[in-house]
Image: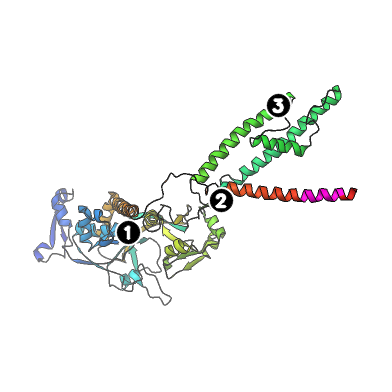
């Protein structure tokens, strides 16, 4: 069967009717491939603006990455744009045989939004005003206050997440107290007092037998419960006791606490060594509820992200978080990382690269933290005007790139190259602190503080008891 397809892009009228043989041309033969390449180099107006890491200028790509052949070809076809969006534009231009005429957003508003007077700005406004054909910065598939646009085939799906300032480092003097959970500290205290009371009960039971059988009293039989609790604390802390029992039941109780002393002291020493030799940090925000309780405002420079918690949410948590949203005229990421007074909004797929290339300290610690619980999930795609005639052709080509896995490969290659370039540069410029180091007196300063505090308290008690004793003697005289 023979079909004819009209191709208006050929200059010669005799070449505008393309014959297609169903049994030959539609089985992906070389003939069909040449005939489907219909744009014949015509210019397609594309709006692009730099955005790390999905669209990067040629000069911002690492030098070794720029030497790769497929990167050079795609960037050349996209007029010097790299990253996922740049490579997608370049490969589409090669596959569909069109010339990419790239321009930035006319007013510098990047993605764009609708003003109160009904006009649109940014790349969205350029598209609606017919100054461009395609916006080649991938964006969330949602309603942008207009029915005049439509989305091309989705590239991938992503989550909108919150970035909070990284928790601060715990001071060395405080690390000794935070190395255990408060419940563990409370358990140590309860075990000491409960063990002393058990010892007191066992000894009272022994005294009952002494009185019944008129046996001889032993040393410490008349010790009070407070004294026995102190003695048991000495055993738990590895010190010697002055009231060693002679009865078998008390010895069994003391043996049990001696074994507990081995376990507790070993665990305590190992945890202290870890606390002294490694840096520890306060707990990060990992849930939206914890973010809400922190009271930090959530800032963004994009008005299109103000619906991250929904427009008509019935959740009290989301309503509370929505009330914390605010618009900044500066970079919200910069503010969150350096001034540490706001949180910001970012795509989940981008945060790993952004943190590891822009917001990482010389010692390798990040300056921002990703809240594990993300409030929104979107599909991302490019936008064109409603009814654009070339939408089916672009969708068919994008579908092939997505299903073949090339989109994720381009994104992963760019991400890996940028991270390796940044870390290599840091290693060359700055000397990192070694992972293993010797313990010094400064690391053990908390122990001396505790000793000094104990000596001070004991001296005060000694002075008070001395004056109290003298007062009692004077009163007797």
Left or right: residue 140 versus residue 387 is right
Who is closer to the viewer here, 196 or 222?
A: 222
**Mark with earlier residue (1, 2):** 1
Left or right: residue 210 versus residue 287 is right
Report the residue at 64% width, 37% height from top: 237
Who is closer to the viewer here, 352 or 10?
A: 352
The residue to which callout 2 is attached is 173
**Mark with earlier residue (1, 3):** 1
Q: Are marks 1 and 2 in contact (CB under 8 Å)?
A: no
Furthest residue in direction right, as rendered: 477
Residue 3 seen in the figure: no
Disc 1: CA contacts within 10 A as few (<14), some (14-19) or many (>=20): many
Report the residue at 13% width, 59% height from top: 18
Q: Secondary structure at mark 3?
A: helix
Residue 193 position, x and y percent, is 71, 39
Numbered circles on residues, count: 3
Left or right: residue 281 versus residue 474 is left
> Which one is closest to the eye, mark 1 or mark 3?
3
Majority secondary structure of the magenta segment? helix
Using the numbered discs, state the Cα–Cα distance from disc 2 to disc 3 in whole angstroms: 38 Å
Color theme of the render: rainbow
Q: Secondary structure at mark 1?
A: loop
User: Within the magenta stretch, is there residue 305?
Assistant: no
The residue to which callout 3 is attached is 251
> Which one is closest to the eye, mark 2 or mark 3?
2
Who is closer to the viewer here, 67 or 346?
A: 67
- Give the magenta range: 464-473
Q: Which mark is residue 54?
A: 1
Residue 218 position, x and y percent, is 79, 27
């Amino acid at each position: 069967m023979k079909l004819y397809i009209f191709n208006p892009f050929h200059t010669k009228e005799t070449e505008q009717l393309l014959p297609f043989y169903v049994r030959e041309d539609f089985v992906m033969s070389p003939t069909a491939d040449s005939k489907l390449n219909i744009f014949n180099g015509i210019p397609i107006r594309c709006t692009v603006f730099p955005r790390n890491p999905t669209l990067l200028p040629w000069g911002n790509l690492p030098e070794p990455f720029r030497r790769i052949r497929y990167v050079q070809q795609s960037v050349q076809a996209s007029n010097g744009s790299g990253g996922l969006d740049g490579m997608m534009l370049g490969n589409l231009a090669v596959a569909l045989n069109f010339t990419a005429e790239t321009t930035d957003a006319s007013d510098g508003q990047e993605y764009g939004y609708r003003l109160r007077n009904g006009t649109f700005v940014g790349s969205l406004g350029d598209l609606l005003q017919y100054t461009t054909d395609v916006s080649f910065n991938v964006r969330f598939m949602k309603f942008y206050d207009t029915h005049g646009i439509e989305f091309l085939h989705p590239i991938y799906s992503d989550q909108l997440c919150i970035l909070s300032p990284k928790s601060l480092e715990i001071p060395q003097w405080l690390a000794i107290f935070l190395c255990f959970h408060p419940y563990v500290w409370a358990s140590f205290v309860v075990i000491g007092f409960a063990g002393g009371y058990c010892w007191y009960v066992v000894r009272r039971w022994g005294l009952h037998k002494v009185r019944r059988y008129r046996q001889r009293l032993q040393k410490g039989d008349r010790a009070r419960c407070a004294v026995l609790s102190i003695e048991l604390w000495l055993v738990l802390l590895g010190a010697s006791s002055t009231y060693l029992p002679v009865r078998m039941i008390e010895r069994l109780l003391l043996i049990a606490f001696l074994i507990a002393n081995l376990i507790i002291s070993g665990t305590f020493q190992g945890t202290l060594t870890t606390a002294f030799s490694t840096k520890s940090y306060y707990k990060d925000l990992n849930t939206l509820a914890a973010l809400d309780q922190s009271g930090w405002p959530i800032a963004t420079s994009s008005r299109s992200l103000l619906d991250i918690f929904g427009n008509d949410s019935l959740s009290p948590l989301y309503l509370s978080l929505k009330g914390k949203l605010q618009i900044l005229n500066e970079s919200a990421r910069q503010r969150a990382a350096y001034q540490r007074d706001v949180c910001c909004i970012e795509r989940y797929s981008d945060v790993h690269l952004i943190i590891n290339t822009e917001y990482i300290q010389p010692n390798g610690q990040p300056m921002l933290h990703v809240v594990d619980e993300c409030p929104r999930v979107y599909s991302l795609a490019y936008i064109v005007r409603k009814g654009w005639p070339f939408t089916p052709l672009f969708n068919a080509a994008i579908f092939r790139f997505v299903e073949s896995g090339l989109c994720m490969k381009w994104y992963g290659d760019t991400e890996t190259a940028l991270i390796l370039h940044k870390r290599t540069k840091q290693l060359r410029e700055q000397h990192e602190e070694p992972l293993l180091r010797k313990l010094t007196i400064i690391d053990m300063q908390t122990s001396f503080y505790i000793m000094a505090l104990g000596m001070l308290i004991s001296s005060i008690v000694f002075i008070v008891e001395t004056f109290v004793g003298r007062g009692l003697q004077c009163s007797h005289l």
